[in-house]
């Protein structure tokens, strides 16, 4: 057998092996992509987060929180805020962020993870996942869903100063969702107008705080995934939120019956 025939067989075998490897890799890519799409679509159903809500309820049984605190509710921004209590000190807060919650998901679970605490205020951070690329909602739907949540938390007839006060955090754009920034901006415009027409509802603009002097997104404030804030990012928005809540609610909290440990008399952490 000539060397040319041996080389030709080896070449054909190498090509067949390369084709099989390429086919396997392609199949894996398709499977991973399909799984990610499935997760995105499945997570649009509030039932998807039932396990996380049940865990909150188990915590409430074993360690019931004091009434009259400030509930932070929403999706990943709240869920991954690891030092929320320290960042908002001396304000008393309850952290109830779950998954990649949509606004409507917060509404669905508010009777279980917001209203039982009789909060003095509710801070809502949601909307970014509503507007996500796969199966994304339009800004009008985000506004309508937020209006439904406000109606649940503050039923008709409440005066402007009645509890709970509701604070809507602006939807913050992230590097990985650059294509959706215009939708985020439009939704924020509509959410601000919604707050202005509802007594006891306030819009807190944190999106503008994470921009550079050139008006671009400061990517240094995000983790490697380009979606979630890092410690510096949380520091920026945390200082602004704390300042606003202290100005609005500090006097009310001081006049309320003191809890077992009065958080307003605790040392304030350095910014």
Image: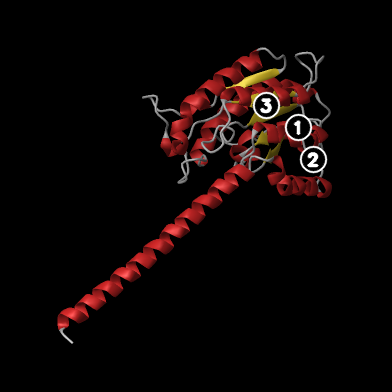
Between residues 15 and 76, which one lies in front from this camera angle? Answer: 15
Asked if the residues shown at circle 3 and circle 1 are in contact, with their CB atoms under 8 angstroms apart, the answer is no
Nearer to me, 97 or 6 = 6
Scheme of image coloration: secondary structure
Q: Indicate the quadrant where residue 149 lies.
A: top right
What residue is rendered at 47% in x and 54% in y? 30
The residue at the point 51 percent across, 26 percent down is 183
Counting residues from the N terminus, which is met first, the one under dot 3 or under dot 2?
2
Location of residue 258 with respect to 47 vertically, above or below = above
- Read off the residue under disc 1: 69
Q: Residues within 10 Å of mark 1 (few under 14, many from 20)?
A: some
Q: CA distance from mark 3 to mark 1?
A: 24 Å
CA gap between label 2 and label 1 equals 8 Å
Q: Which residue is mark 3?
A: 145
First in sequence: mark 3 vs mark 1:
1
Residue at point 52%, 26% (across, down): 184
Can you tell which quarter of the image residue 74 is in?
top right
- Residue of label 2: 65
Q: How many neighbours does mark 3 have within 10 angstroms: few (below 14), some (14-19), or many (20 or more)?
A: many
Q: Residue at x 81, y 30 (%)?
A: 118
- Which quadrant of the rendered structure holds the N terminus? bottom left
Q: Nearer the viewer, mark 3 or mark 2?
A: 3
């Amino acid at each position: 057998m000539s060397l040319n025939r041996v080389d030709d067989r080896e070449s054909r075998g190498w090509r067949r092996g390369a084709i099989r490897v390429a086919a396997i890799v392609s199949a894996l890519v398709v499977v991973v992509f399909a799984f990610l799409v499935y997760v995105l679509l499945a997570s649009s159903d509030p039932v998807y987060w039932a396990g996380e809500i049940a865990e909150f309820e188990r915590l409430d049984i074993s360690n019931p929180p004091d009434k009259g605190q400030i509930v932070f509710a929403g999706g990943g921004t709240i869920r991954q805020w690891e030092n929320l209590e320290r960042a908002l000190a001396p304000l008393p807060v309850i952290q109830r962020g779950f998954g990649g919650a949509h606004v409507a998901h917060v509404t669905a679970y508010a009777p279980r993870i917001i209203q039982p605490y009789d909060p003095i205020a509710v801070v809502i951070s949601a909307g970014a996942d509503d507007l996500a690329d796969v199966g994304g909602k339009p800004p009008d739907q985000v506004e309508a869903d937020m209006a439904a949540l406000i109606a649940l938390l503050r039923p008709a007839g409440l005066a402007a100063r009645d509890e709970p006060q509701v604070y809507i955090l602006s939807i913050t754009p992230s590097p990985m969702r650059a294509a959706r920034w215009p939708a985020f901006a439009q939704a924020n415009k509509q959410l601000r107008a919604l707050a202005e027409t509802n007594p006891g509802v306030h819009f807190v603009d944190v999106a503008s705080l994470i921009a550079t002097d050139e008006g671009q997104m400061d990517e240094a404030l995000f983790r490697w995934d380009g979606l979630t804030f890092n410690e510096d990012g949380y520091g920026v928005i945390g200082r602004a939120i704390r300042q606003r809540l202290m100005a609005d609610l500090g006097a009310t909290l001081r006049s309320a019956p003191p809890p077992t440990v009065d958080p307003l008399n605790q040392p304030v952490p350095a910014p």
